[in-house]
Image (cartoon, rainbow, N blue to C red):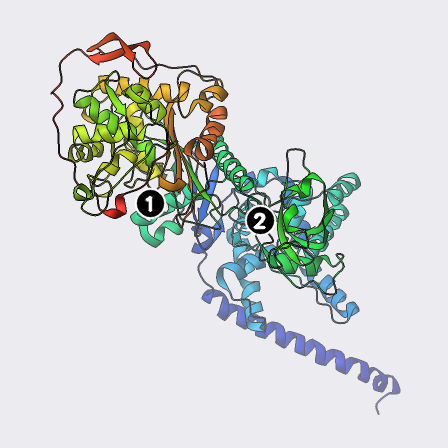
Amino acid sequence: MVSPLFTRLRWVLLPLALFAGALLIAVALGGILVVIAYPQLPSLDALTDYRPKIPLRVYTADGFLIGEFGEERRSLIPIQEVPPTMKQAILAAEDERFYQHSGIDTLGILRAAYSNFVSGGKRQGASTITMQVARNFFLSSEKTLTRKLYEALLSFKIEHNLTKDEILELYVNQIYLGQRAYGFAAASQIYFGKPLADVSVAEAAMLAGLPKAPSSYNPVANPRRARIRQLYVLRRMQDLGFITSEQFQAAQAETLQIKRDVNDFGIHAEYVAEMARQIAYERYQDDAYTMGLSIVTTIVKADQDNAYAAVRRGVLEYDRRHGYRGAEAYVDVNGLDGHEEEALDDLIQDFDDSSGLVPALVLSADPRRVRAYVHGGEIVELTGEALKFASRMIDEKSPPNRRIRRGAVIRVMKDGKSAWQIAQLPDVEAALVVASPTDGAIQALVGGVDFNRNKFNHVTQAWRQPGSSFKPFIYSAALEKGYSPASVIPDEPVTVSAEETGSQEWEPKNYDGKYEGPMTLRTALTKSKNMVSIRLLQSIGTRYAQDYVTRFGFDADKNPPYLTLALGAGSATPWQQVAAYSVFANGGYKIEPYIVKQIVDGKGNILAAAKPVMAGDESLRVIDARNAYIMDSMLRDVVRRGTAARAGAVLKRNDLAGKTGTTNDYVDAWFCGYQPSVVAISWIGFDQPKRLGNNETGAVAALPIWIAFMEKGLKGAPEKSMARPDGLTQITATDPSTTHEVQEYIYQEALPPVTEDKATPAPAQFLGGSGTP
């Protein structure tokens, strides 16, 4: 007979027995699966011999990063170099018991299960850092029981074979953090523009919040959600005792400066980086983007910053001289009153910041005040002087498609007092290249106003007419033909008949329309007299001059043997000009400009290095030392008292030399000049050639860029003079145009007499009205 007690217990014990049996069976099955699956787990070679894809990086000569190319942006960093604050932020956000568990955090799983049960739908994960490493290296992200089992088994295997610091190092370098950033070192550079070692507590918390969902918590794409996640990580850091309440409050109040452009490295050297990338690709093809190459360029950060600022300033000054063109675009702002930050950001997100020219959305406008929304939440009010530049486009009489009104997208920038004012994106382009005349190392290169808008490199790719900046090479050729600076040639009108040109009569003019009669070559170059240059070229012969200028690196086929060669009607690039003017600066040697110093592999081995030949090597000599000395003397006079006198007045130095240049009808403006230790070439013009405007000569448009660079670049540098070579005799000469006596130089040895050489007629397309200085 069954007792009542047994009957009652049976209903309790039976379920327990069934549960225990099921548990034993599950454990047995799990053990069998482990025995079967564990040997099938992948090898850990990918972890123990970690070789991730490392992008191509480009640096300045003094070690600053200026470019990065590759599908994955990653910077490897040893765990010892990860700052403690960053480690603590990661542990607080992802795995607080990382150093206690053995790959699977049982307590974390139970806590997550309880949280999920209580929350009734909002899921909380319990994935450890080790499990994330296993998943990132070996598994997919699918949420299946099989994948979870393999993830757990792999975690145990990883923990058994690697130390905790080794696991954390893999995690820190491998995890994806948005914006193509893999690893925290790369993310720190991409989001904040600084090394990981320099991040603050607030920045570390922002980075640590990214692994959970990089797209959702990306501070560039989703600043609000990123902020929420950052505050969560900061609270966890405080709860775990990693930071004090004072540190928490300070971090909470800190305003983070987020980089919106992933290619912003803090130095505007995008054209240089692209040149380096092309060189690497030519050598290594697609492997260049994954094998961890570092390219060290010749540019210097201070010079590059200075060059970029000089170009930007020169372009903006030119732009302001020619007036405001009107609103950039219009968007629909109906229903918005200025407080809908996210909606307003969406409306202007396609308008990128262009070097401080910030897009702004006009909320209201009248002739006295413009109220506009700037990306990120700031609303600016522009009044008085801030509106002066654009005043004619605020008036009701302005063209409707250009008027500044509600819904217009405009540009604003901060002035020297950090006050907002209306600006605009310049249409004109400009370039500046700076090199050492000793070995050709490029110290700075700005190939255009904004690489993101126009990737065409005007230093190396733009074939433009050099205008009067080409005259020194004609004068140098004349010195070789027996002329001297004291030689006298009339500055009088020249007419070339249609019979001689074979097409139409050509009547060139001086840029100012004035003629001063006979003058020395020195005075003629100083004043950039076109008539003297043409007569000089007629005398020495166009074919001789065409051949002679190739010594400086100019292409013969780009500079046809016509009389217009005297006015620079051929074609040259700023890259050629910097090499050509270096010949005058270094005493007669042709150096080759170069921009890559060396290529280094991921282990620091030098794969390739530049081996420039220095000026002074007689194998490089292309003109006589006496010729170079005399030309240097004449070009210094251009700066002292000629068309570039503004440079001498501003810089107050006696060792500057150069030549202004503007092409026919004010299409291209140049200044090509140097100090014995540095050569700089500035150019300004439109991509689709058109007039820069009346009187926009080289002295007005291009020279200010050169001066702005040299003003900082030569600060503190001692003055230098070229040593006078043997073989020159000093004489006293009289300039008929001034009747002044001057001390002049001539060759001691007689040179071949000047021989007349019939000039080649010029086709109509090479005939211009007047070159300008």
* Location of residue 510 with respect to 26 vertically, above or below: above
The residue tagged 2 is: 353
Q: What residue type is labelled 2?
A: Asp
Viewed as shown, does residue 353 lie left or right of 632? right
Where is residue 526 drawn, in percent x and y?
35, 22
User: Could you classify mark 2 by the number of other residues whose Cα lies within 10 Å: few (under 14), some (14-19), or many (20 or more)?
Assistant: some
Viewer can see residue 459: no
* Location of residue 142 with respect to 537 vertically, above or below: below
Secondary structure beneath dot 1 equals helix
**In terms of depth relative to the viewer, which is nearer, 763 or 515?**
515
Look at 33% across and 49% down and name the residue there: 281
Viewed as shown, does residue 450 lie left or right of 121? left
**In terms of depth relative to the viewer, which is nearer, 446 or 322?**
322
The residue tagged 1 is: 279
Where is residue 152 drawn, in percent x and y?
57, 63
Where is residue 134 drawn, in percent x and y?
53, 59
Look at 66% across and 61% down and name the residue there: 126
User: Could you classify mark 1 by the number of other residues whose Cα lies within 10 Å: few (under 14), some (14-19), or many (20 or more)?
Assistant: some
Q: Residue 754 carries which label?
A: none
